[in-house]
Image: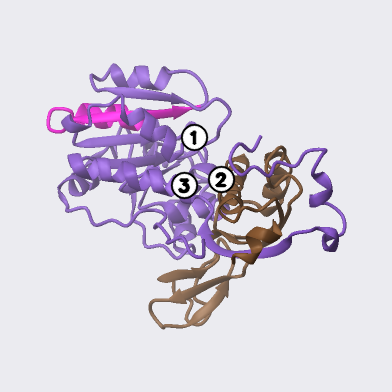
Chain colours: A brown, B purple
Amino acid sequence: MHELSVCQALIDEVARIATSCAARTVGRITIEVGQLSGVEPELLARAFEIARAGTCAAQAELSIAVPEIVVHCNDCGASSSARPNRLLCASCGGYRTRVLEGDGLRLRAVELDVPEAHAALH
Amino acid sequence: MCQTCGCTVTAGNAHLAAGDSHARPGAHATVEVLQDLLAANDRVAAHNREHFDEYGVLAINLMSSPGAGKTTLLEATIRALRDRYRIAVIEGDLETDNDAARIRAQGVPAVQITTGTACHLDAHLVHRALHDLPLAGLDLLFIENVGNLVCPASFDLGQHVNVVLLCATEGDDKPAKYPVMFRAADLVVLSKADLLGVMDDFDAARAEAALRALGRETPVIRAAARRAPALDAWLGWLEQQLTAPRAIAPLRPLQATAGV
């Protein structure tokens, strides 16, 4: 289950951001998990419960966005939505497509609780 | 425990993290980021790739389900090419160094990574293994990933190409079942292809159609380590990779860190 490895990487990054903002605690963490990223959102959410323990994100909520897959057709130029194992152009049926959206695994936003003195500087 | 950010929640400060946020003395800030979650892995992968390029080593990440014939293919490949190319292998398995021993028996260096319970290799593990390899004296490095069609697909190791084996004894719908892995492939090898004649429920054309449905033009070749069709197509592809200028994009391009 590589979701735990992904979560540990997520927590490391969140901790780095929290430190750079002198945050006391982390509230909501928003991530994007593409259906073609190889990561299962449900398993990731469960792994997060384990990975966050004892870290600055111990009380954080994880919000997971799963965007629709969008492919661009190199033959006819159309963009269309697709399924993970059927990434064909919906317009011409061609297979020479490129995934525009749906393979990302990204940290989008972190909500922090920042002390007043530090917040005033920003 | 969080050792760096100084904000570990304890019994003494848990009230700051829970309950009514308006009661907190501080301010809320939302930091917008757009960063790949595996950026730390990708940085090390890029570093590994720099090492390979510095020494002119072609690095191939070999992936498949367990038992598809990765090690057997490597043994036969080494026998065929060892007089002309300097080859080494990094072996990834949960336990044992059986595979590294099989490779060493072919007269080339091999480093075994035992991952314990981890289901994939990552760039850090490969980087550590590189210290035990004579990179300066190599032309070709195979990284035999942990047998698994799921997790290894998500981790860039610094390789130049991904080769995925699809075994004749598996289902021909594997590309449809494991789209992330087969999308990552630069080459798909139908392994144990000498069995295709007897495995009448495996239709090579159906396997290829499932691969095309992933929007991929990836070449598919047949290989059998012991009998015909043998390794001609595979060895030909390898020679082409070894002599071609390296212009292959990494599995996961590095993304700029934004916002922070």
Q: CA distance from mark 1 to mark 2?
A: 23 Å
Q: CA distance from mark 2 to mark 3?
A: 7 Å
Residue type, mark 2 in image: Ala
Q: Which residue is mark 3?
A: B40
Asked which quadrant contains residue A122, the reply is bottom right
Are the residues under marks 2 and 3 on the same chain?
no
Residue A95: x %, y % from top left: 44, 70
Residue A49: x %, y % from top left: 74, 43
Residue B77 on the magenta span: yes
| Front in this rendered view, residue A19 or B155 | A19
Crowding near pointer 2: few (<14 within 10 Å), some, many (20+)?
A: some
Question: In the image, B197: left or right of B3?
Answer: left
Q: Quadrant of the N terminus of chain A?
A: top right
A90 relative to B113, above or below = below
Residue type, mark 3 in image: Ala
Residue type, mark 1 in image: Gly
Question: In the image, A65: left or right of B103?
Answer: right
Task: Name the element at disc 1.
Answer: loop
Residue drawn where x is 70% and y is 41% of the image? B8
User: Is any part of residue A110 visible from this angle?
Assistant: no
